[in-house]
Image (cartoon, rainbow, N blue to C red):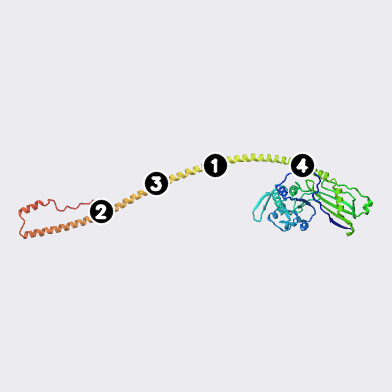
């Protein structure tokens, strides 16, 4: 028995009526900018989908694929293909983008808490220290910027845990559910047209195909909060009918709109002889299955809204308890810190006092040393003056002795000169007396008396003074 898969047309934005409660009423900057651009983004959880094959399909050029990434290659910009859905890493600058979920090495611990420290390094060498929540927020800022800058993107696909659970699916890495839920929350927030990602409503339907006529033949199976029931066919009709299995997946946003619907028919028959499953079959099926969709979707979303409110209330209660514990611990830490600060201040004051005392002693020692040096300088100067005076006196003595010797020589010379002059004068007198005696006297007695009276009575030459 051959099986043939046939994709049927998609239905967009099927309104189910007003009054549907919104899961989140807050509008982020990203959603505000996308709304100004008139953009719509749908988020699709994928299970069992080969991203490496899907990203190559020409019909998926408007899809941004989110794959699980490690911190090191996320920061380095590496484009080498990895394992799991990281096979699409070579497309990371176009239709693919990664979200860090762990370290690349198995030796490092897996991410268990949003506050776990994370250190990574850019190719430039700049190291960044943050925590798990910080690096995830950084990654989603890049994703939002990519979606805002590229108007071609209309859908976001990511790997989900299962068909029934849209939690982020992991394979190579093993982060905690807290980390996965935080990443999934960010991914849901990428949807534009509601505050959260579209809720998935899936069901399988067994239908009979008899050419142009098609009627339902078995029960319907449906997930994500809504159930569909179909009337059963008789056993005779089931035996004679050519049956076809129709798998429908409908995504409904928080405003109660069908943002995407995809139906795949698997025909059970002999090769190509199986009767076609036409558009009329799909229309009839949707008319029958979604006749009362408004009430069912409203109830489903309200249930989700109430569940989330309950979860948020429980989380707030837990957070309040944690905050109280943290405040108590912080109070104890502050008390201890104040005590340590007071002790530190006391130690600083004591050290400051000791330091001041030491500086005072040093100054006194310096002053004493300066006074001692000044006294030594004075004594040295006094000794130098005494030495200079002694040298001066010695020089004066030497100079006086030389002067005395010079004067004695001059006196001796003067005495010799006087003696020679006296000898000459005596000789001259003797000659004069001799001539006078020999010649007639021309001097009268009167003249002789006058001469004698005019001559001095003292010797002509005094003896030279004696030097001490």
3 or 4: tag closer to the N-terminus: 4
Query: Is label 1 in a helix, a strand or a loop?
Result: helix
Q: Quadrant of residue 2?
A: bottom right
> Within 10 angstroms of label 4, few (less than 14), some, or many (20 or more) residues?
few
In the rendered image, residue 398, in percent from the top left (x then y), is placed at: 29, 53
In the rendered image, residue 408, in percent from the top left (x then y), is placed at: 23, 55
Q: Which mark is residue 352?
A: 1
Query: Is label 3 in a helix, a strand or a loop?
Result: helix
Q: Which mark is residue 309?
A: 4
**Residue where numbered disc 2 is placed:** 404
Q: Nearer the viewer, residue 177 or 458?
A: 177
3 or 1: tag closer to the N-terminus: 1
Query: Is label 4 in a helix, a strand or a loop?
Result: helix
User: Is 182 situated left or right of 295 in this image?
Assistant: left
Q: Nearer the viewer, residue 295 or 103?
A: 295
Q: What is the CA distance from the residue labelled 3 to the residue labelled 1? A: 38 Å
Residue 106 in view of the camera: no
Q: Does residue 273 sit above or below 251 in this rendering? A: below
1 or 2: tag closer to the N-terminus: 1
User: Is 181 situated left or right of 381 in this image?
Assistant: right
**Residue where numbered disc 3 is placed:** 378
Can you name the residue that lies furthest to the right here? 236
């Amino acid at each position: 028995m051959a099986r043939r898969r046939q994709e049927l047309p998609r239905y967009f934005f099927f309104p189910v009526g007003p009054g549907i409660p919104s899961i989140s009423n807050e509008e982020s900057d990203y959603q505000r900018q996308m709304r100004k651009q008139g953009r719509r983004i749908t988020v699709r959880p994928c299970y069992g989908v080969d991203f490496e094959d899907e990203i190559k399909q020409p019909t998926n050029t408007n899809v941004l694929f989110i794959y699980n990434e490690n911190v090191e290659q996320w920061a380095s910009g590496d484009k080498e293909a990895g394992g799991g859905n990281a096979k699409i890493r070579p497309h990371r600058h176009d239709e693919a983008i990664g979200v860090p979920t762990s370290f690349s090495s198995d030796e490092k611990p897996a991410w268990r808490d949003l506050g776990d420290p994370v250190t990574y390094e850019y190719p430039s060498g700049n190291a960044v220290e943050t925590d798990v929540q910080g690096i995830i927020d950084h990654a989603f800022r890049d994703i939002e910027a990519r979606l805002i800058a590229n108007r071609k993107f209309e859908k976001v696909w990511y790997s989900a845990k299962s068909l029934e659970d849209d939690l982020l699916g992991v394979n190579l890495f093993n982060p905690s559910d807290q980390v996965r839920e935080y990443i999934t929350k960010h991914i849901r927030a990428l949807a534009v047209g509601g505050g959260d990602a579209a809720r998935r409503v899936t069901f399988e339907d067994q239908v009979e195909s008899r050419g142009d006529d098609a009627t339902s033949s078995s029960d319907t199976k449906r997930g994500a909060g809504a159930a569909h029931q179909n009337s059963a066919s008789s056993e005779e009709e089931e035996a004679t009918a050519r049956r076809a299995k129709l798998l429908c997946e409908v995504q409904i946003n928080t405003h109660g709109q069908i943002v995407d619907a995809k139906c795949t028919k698997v025909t059970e028959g002999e090769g190509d002889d199986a009767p076609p499953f036409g558009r009329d079959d799909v229309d009839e099926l949707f008319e029958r299955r979604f006749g009362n969709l408004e009430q069912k979707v409203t109830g489903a979303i309200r249930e989700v809204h109430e569940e989330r409110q309950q979860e948020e209330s429980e989380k707030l209660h837990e957070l309040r308890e944690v905050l109280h514990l943290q405040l108590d611990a912080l109070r104890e830490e502050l008390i201890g810190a104040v005590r340590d600060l007071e002790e530190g201040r006391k130690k600083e004051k004591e050290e400051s006092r000791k330091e001041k005392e030491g500086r005072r002693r040093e100054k006194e020692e310096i002053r004493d040393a300066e006074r001692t040096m000044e006294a030594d300088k004075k004594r040295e100067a006094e000794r130098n003056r005494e030495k200079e005076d002694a040298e001066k006196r010695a020089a004066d003595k030497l100079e006086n002795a030389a002067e005395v010797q010079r004067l004695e020589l001059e006196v001796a010379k003067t005495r010799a000169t006087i003696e020679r002059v006296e000898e000459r004068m005596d000789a001259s007198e003797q000659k004069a007396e001799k001539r006078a005696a020999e010649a007639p006297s021309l001097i009268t007695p009167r003249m002789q008396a006058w001469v004698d009276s005019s001559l001095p009575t003292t010797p002509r030459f005094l003896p030279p003074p004696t030097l001490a």
